[in-house]
Image (tube, grey):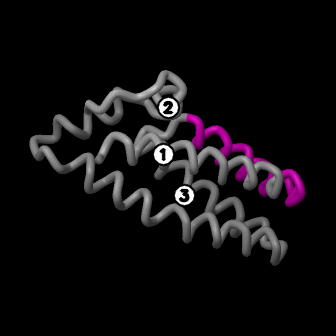
């Protein structure tokens, strides 16, 4: 495993990553990480569009999907922010959802940096 700072390590759940690496194929984790890194930016754009259009149901659905993806790759700081976006949307507070969505973009950037360091 590539050396990472303790701050970067706090972004990811290494037990999830090690479980993926033990799937029998040495490149399984890298493939999954690449898919995550490709899939999340369009989802974040869709989330922003759903917030802008006032579609609380779409915001909740996209946030829920993002949470599953984050947990699947071990992005442990993203998941609770996804829950905050989803909960705010379900409560009808798109302003709170928007605030949490901005934080979600920052958490994705941190996860992206940590994952890229691991797959290089």
Per the rendered image, the range of residues in magenta is 77-96
Dot label at residue 65: 3
The residue positioned farthest toward the top in the image shown: 6
Mark 1 burial class by Cα count in 10 Å: few <14, some 14-19, many 20+: some
Dot label at residue 113: 1
Relative horizontal placement of residue 10, taking residue 61 as reference (left or right): left
Give the distance between the C-alpha atoms of the residues marked 1 and 3, in whole angstroms.
21 Å
Mark 3 burial class by Cα count in 10 Å: few <14, some 14-19, many 20+: some
Relative horizontal placement of residue 72, taking residue 30 as reference (left or right): right
Q: Is disc 3 placed on a helix, strand or loop?
A: helix
Counting from the top left corner in percent of width and height, residue 1 is at 26, 30
Relative horizontal placement of residue 116, taking residue 56 as reference (left or right): left
Q: Main secondary structure of the magenta part?
A: helix
Counting from the top left corner in percent of width and height, residue 57 is at 73, 67
**Is residue 105 shown above or below 111?**
below
Q: Which residue is mark 2?
A: 8
Q: Are marks 2 and 1 in contact (CB under 8 Å)?
A: yes
Give the distance between the C-alpha atoms of the residues marked 2 and 3, in whole angstroms.
23 Å
Q: Earlier in the sequence, mark 1 or mark 3?
A: 3
Camera-side residue of 118 and 60 = 118
């Amino acid at each position: 495993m590539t050396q990472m700072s303790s701050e970067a390590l706090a972004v990811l759940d290494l037990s999830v990553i090690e479980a993926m690496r033990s799937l029998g194929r040495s490149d399984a984790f890298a493939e999954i990480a690449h898919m995550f890194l490709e899939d999340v930016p369009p989802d974040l754009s869709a989330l922003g569009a759903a917030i802008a259009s006032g579609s609380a149901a779409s915001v909740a659905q996209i946030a829920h999907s993002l949470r599953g993806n984050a947990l699947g790759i071990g992005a442990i700081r993203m998941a609770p922010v996804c829950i905050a976006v989803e909960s705010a949307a379900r409560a009808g507070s798109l302003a709170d959802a928007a605030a949490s969505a901005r934080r979600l973009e920052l958490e994705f950037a941190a996860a992206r940096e940590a994952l890229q360091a691991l797959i290089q």
